Every structure is written in C-alpha cells, then in structure tokens.
Image (spheres, rainbow, N blue to C red):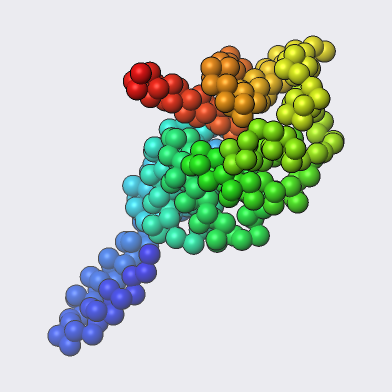
Amino acid sequence: MPRSPLLAAWITIASVTHVLLAFVILVLKTHAAEDSKAEQNYQRAISAYTAGNILDAKKLLNEAIGQDTHYAPAYMARGFILQYERKYREAVHDFSKVIEMEPRRAEAWFRRGVEHFNLGQFKRSVEDFETFAELEPGQRPHLWQLGIAYYYTGQFQQGRELFESHQTVNSHDVENAVWHFLCVAKLDGFEAARASFIDLKGDKRVPMMQVHALFKGTGTEDDVLKAAHEGSAVGGALMRYSFYAHLYLGLYHEAKANTDQAYDYMRKAAQHYKSNGYMGHVARVHRDWLKGKRQERSEDQ
C-alpha cells in the first residue's frame, strides 16, 4: 500500500526536526519489513500448498495476513483453500477483501461468483459472473457457470443466449445442449425445447450420448442407467458415470415438471454418487433448491 503521502505530509512541516524525520523513516522501514515478511510467508505457503501440505499453507497465509492486512495475494490464496474445504462463506469473505483492494482483478469476481452459487445466492452469483465477463469480455462465451446461474434466477432468455454462445467454443458438449434445453423449456415448453435441441456428436464421456438421446426423444432413462452401470467401469469411474446419469435424469424430469422424480434423482446424485467437481456442487445446490420448493408447497397446502 502507498505510504509516500504520509512521508510528504511530515516533511512539509517547517518545524520538523531531524529526530522526527528519523522517526518517520524508521516507521516506513518497519512497514516495509512487515510487507517483506508477509511476502515471504505467502511464498512459503504457495510452496507448502504445491507440496500438498494444505494445513501448513493455510497457517502461513494466516500469518501473512496478520502481518499485512492489505496483502491481497494472501487473501486470494486462502480463498482457494477455503473453497477446497467447502467453507463457502469464509471464501466469500476472502475474495471480497481482494475485490475491495483490487476491484479489477477478474479472477476474484469469478471465484466469489462460484461461492455465492454454492451458498444458493444466485442473484449475487450472477452479478459476480457478469462483472467477471465485463472485465474479461473474451471469456463470456466460455462462461457456462453464468448460464447455469441464470437458470436459477429465472433469467431463461439470458441463459439460452449464453449457452448458444458457448456452443460456438465447445461444440461437442452434451451438458451445454441440455442446459440450453432447460432454458428453452422454461420459455416455450418441453416440446419446443425438444424441437430446437442442439444436435451434436462426439461427447465421449459416459453416459452423455445416452443423455443426449433421452432429451432428443430417441432414448430412454433405462438406456442412461445401463450405460452408466454396465461395462468394465469400477470404483471412481463407476461413481462418476452414475453421478452424471442421475444428475441429468433429474434435470430431464425437471424439464418435464415431474418434481418428485426430479428430486429423487438429484438427491441420489448429490448424496449417493457425490462428485467433487463443479457439477457436484450444482447437484447439491439443485437438490436443496428443490427441497426448498417442496417445503414451500407443503406450507401452502
């Protein structure tokens, strides 16, 4: 942080003495030394994190922040660790501190948008992602996270347009086609969404092409589940296939307004076949979102 104005204020006082001037210089040198310590602990934290010593890295970052509360890189790095620990509110705090100090640091806006989404704060998530896109306009077509957030805020036209732009940079992604479908279904109905469904080939992930066939109307739910559960996949691969099968079967029933089936599939995706990736967070958030809607309906009856 700049300290030259403070020094200027002192030395322009006509009655300043050599002793006072020496004191000011000493204060400045002390601050510089504190900055150096914060930088050193930050660098040590990065080395610890790279080596897999997460707890040591977090401790060093805490020390760096204690030494210089205006040291943005330490907040940014600690925010990453808090994301890893699924401490969403604390991560929001750290990324917000970075934004306060460096409002044009695009990555901080993106990371906070992710955490706001994880908290189910969809409007704030949209605002953060949109700010990121303003700062990095070339990244907007790649920003499918914003498209998903639009769905939960009910901004279906914006979501539709975002997923259409994403298709231009990622033309083999069944997930993009499905989220586009979901937005169109909310705008124009299920059959209209099926009629305008993005046709594509080449998504080699299991069971994505079976998911595509289901939404297209040429496949079944059983086809999706069989593709996920049959074959030679075991362990982590089987869990991953099962996760995506249940996530997108849940979204299929979401598009058809079959709320009970949608919730059952999403609950299994979020709990039984839990994924640590971004879509794993989407499954958890969507499950909780549907659960909230179910509670609202029961209270109204």
Q: Quadrant of residue 12?
A: bottom left
98 left or right of 199 in image: left
- Which residue shows up at 24% across the image and 82% down it? 11
Outermost residue on the right side: it is: 202
- Which residue shows up at 35% across the image and 18% down it? 301
Residue in the foreground of this view, choosing between 132 and 201: 201
Residue in the foreground of this view, choosing between 239 and 251: 251
Residue 193 x %, y %: 69, 37
Q: Quadrant of residue 275?
A: top right
Q: How many dots with numbers?
A: 0
Residue 241 x %, y %: 71, 21
Outermost residue on the bottom side: it is: 14
Residue in the foreground of this view, choosing between 43 and 295: 295
78 left or right of 269 in image: left
Residue 178 x %, y %: 69, 35
The quarter of the picture where the N terminus appears is: bottom left
- Which residue shows up at 31% across the image and 76% down it? 5
- The answer to whether residue 58 of the structure is visible from this angle is no
- Which residue shows up at 50% across the image and 56% down it? 131
Residue 50 x %, y %: 59, 39
- The answer to whether residue 171 of the structure is visible from this angle is yes
Residue in the foreground of this view, choosing between 2 and 288: 288
Q: Is residue 207 above or below residue 37?
A: above
